[in-house]
Amino acid sequence: AQSVAQPEDQVNVAEGNPLTVKCTYSVSGNPYLFWYVQYPNRGLQFLLKYITGDNLVKGSYGFEAEFNKSQTSFHLKKPSALVSDSALYFCAVRDFGSRTSGTYKYIFGTGTRLKVLA
Amino acid sequence: EPEVTQTPSHQVTQMGQEVILRCVPISNHLYFYWYRQILGQKVEFLVSFYNNEISEKSEIFDDQFSVERPDGSNFTLKIRSTKLEDSAMYFCASTALDSSGNTIYFGEGSWLTVV
């Protein structure tokens, strides 16, 4: 089964500094990878995804992620953090679901809380 | 921008009572999901639904849970007899599973508190 791991429960970064939120994956075949952000008491908002093509994927709010096949990683990055980026970030992978119906399910990491300090 | 909508946003219920959580997926989506999140922690898969039937369900989705698409618009999650440990945020999600890369979109969630 496909899986993702987020090794850090929390990441602290000063405002204006670059940020990285780590994600590693374990898949058979080509991975479909996603990043979502969750603000307090809200749903999960889609940030970006990697399906194929360029290893550097750009997404919403200035975020980007780099797909690295040799390291099986898909780290989320932003060149200059804002206090408003403070939230819970989830990495996800599309897993094979029901082979009879051809559907899929999405497996989420345990989440990383990003705290941007003013 | 189209979105997944969920109702109620918050429900408090007595243990043993039945609860129905409602969702309206994005209109051209065909694949629907329920996920659960306890206390802002990990997001757990409950069930996927396609073509009016369950595609896959997790161990959490036991006989107390059921899903339905009663009218071609709503997608509901029913918990027949709630337990304290069912207290969680429940998220509905949908995707088109097309060539756009299968992004899954989530609603804002229904916060269920069982007392």
Image: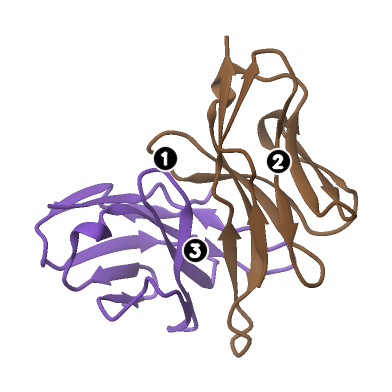
Chain colours: A brown, B purple
Within 10 Å of the Cα at label 2, are there few (<14), some (14-19), or many (20+) other Cα atoms?
many
CA separation, marks 3 and 1?
21 Å
> What type is the residue that disc 1 sits on?
Arg
Q: Do the residues labelled 3 and 2 touch (CB within 8 Å)?
A: no
Residue B109, percent across and down? 37, 50
| Residue identified by numbered label 2 | A22
Q: Nearer the viewer, mark 2 or mark 1?
A: 2
| Residue identified by numbered label 3 | B27
Q: Which numbered disc covers residue B86?
A: none
Element on which disc 1 rests: loop
Label 3 and label 1 in one chain: no
Q: Which of marks 3 and 1 is in front?
A: 1
Count of labels shown?
3
Residue A41, percent across and down? 37, 38
Q: Are marks 3 and 1 in contact (CB under 8 Å)?
A: no
> What type is the residue that disc 3 sits on?
Ser
Element on which disc 3 rests: loop
Residue A29 drawn above or below residue B103: below
